[in-house]
Image (cartoon, rainbow, N blue to C red):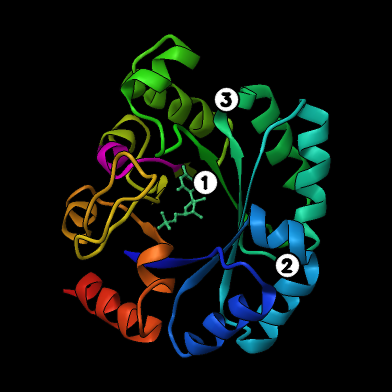
Amino acid sequence: MQLCVALDLPSMKENLELAKELKTFDIWLKVGFRSFIRDGRTLLSELKNLNPSFRIFLDLKLYDIPNTMADAAEEIAKMDVDMFNVHASAGKEAMQRVMHRLEPLKKRPLVLAVTVLTSFDYHTFKEIYSNDIEEKAKQFALQSYQAGLDGVVCSVFESSMLKHETEPGFITLTPGIRPFGEPSEDQKRVADIETAKREKVDIIVVGRPVYKAKKPAEAVERILQNLSV
Ligand code: C5P
């Protein structure tokens, strides 16, 4: 299991300070809406300057018509990121078009599909999708697998089941991780590291429990130690 730290801080300076503090670790860094909208490509290249082996996950959750999604995917691939994501609810055709557009590239980023946002609980989900979370997550995972994506962003509690529905090598990346019982805040379905291991998660995303820790490097070290035992 690998660790991905979310760079969700209020300024580029703070994100870079955090990344600098973590630069000796073998980890992923997640650049999401807040950081990318504000600091764009500059942030991405500064991170690679800090440590070229940082793996960057650009978490922009693309959702649009198929051609626009494929165009966006092509532009993302030019930015030398290692992974990005789309919403599975954009549909199978859109996901297929994304993968088709990336096909000619010598090296392409991994592409994951968001199944169900981890901030949804049963009722809010049903209001939007008129379906159960688990059913819909299964359907979304299957469609993204059939479209040739590399994996899904899902809740810890769905990881093992979604691998079973697709194949064990289909990557699962799970936010909502509270490694040592930290507050869940706005996340509704949170889990600790042991649960993530049991659920065969490939990559855990941790934001606040790392960047709100007094010593983020120590928090990361402790998480990594727990991942390897
Ligand atoms: O601070 P916390 O550990 O809750 O951060 C989780 C990160 O994962 C945030 O950047 C959030 O946007 C992201 N995320 C999520 N749920 C998803 C996809 C991404 O929480 N389904």
- Relative side of 58 to 207, left or right: right
User: Element at badge 3?
Assistant: helix
Q: Residue at x 35, y 66 (%)?
A: 209
Residue 110 pos. (x, y %): 58, 54
Q: Is residue 105 visible?
A: no
Three-letter amino acid code of the residue under disc 2: Asp
Which residue is the extreme one toward the top?
A: 130
User: Where is 155 relative to 74, above or below?
Assistant: above
Which quarter of the figure is the C terminus placed in? bottom left
| Residue located at (37% from left, 25% from top) | 138
10 Å crowding of disc 2: few (<14), some (14-19), many (20+): some
Closer to viewer: mark 1 or mark 3? 3
Q: How far apart are the alpha carbons under marks 2 and 3?
A: 26 Å
User: Which of pointers 1 and 3 lies earlier in the amino acid sequence?
Assistant: 3
Judged by its main secondary structure, the magenta piece is helix
Q: For mark 2, what is the residue? A: 80
Determine the residue positioned at 29% across, 76% down: 224
N-term-proximal mark, 2 vs 3: 2
Q: Secondary structure at mark 2?
A: loop
Which mark is in front, 2 or 1?
2
State yes or no: Cβ of the residue under disc 2 lies below 8 Å from any atom of ligand 1: no
Say whether marks 2 and 3 touch (CB < 8 Å): no
Other residues around mark 3 within 10 Å, as few (<14) / some (14–19) / many (≥20):
many
> Closer to the N terminus: mark 2 or mark 1?
2
The front one of 26 and 101 is 26
Position of 147 compared to 168: left or right?
right
User: What residue did someone put label 1 on?
Assistant: 150
Say what amino acid the circle numbered 3 marks.
Ser
Q: Which residue is mark 3?
A: 89
Residues in magenta, as a range: 153-160
Compared across the picture, whether 40 is left or right of 23 comes to right
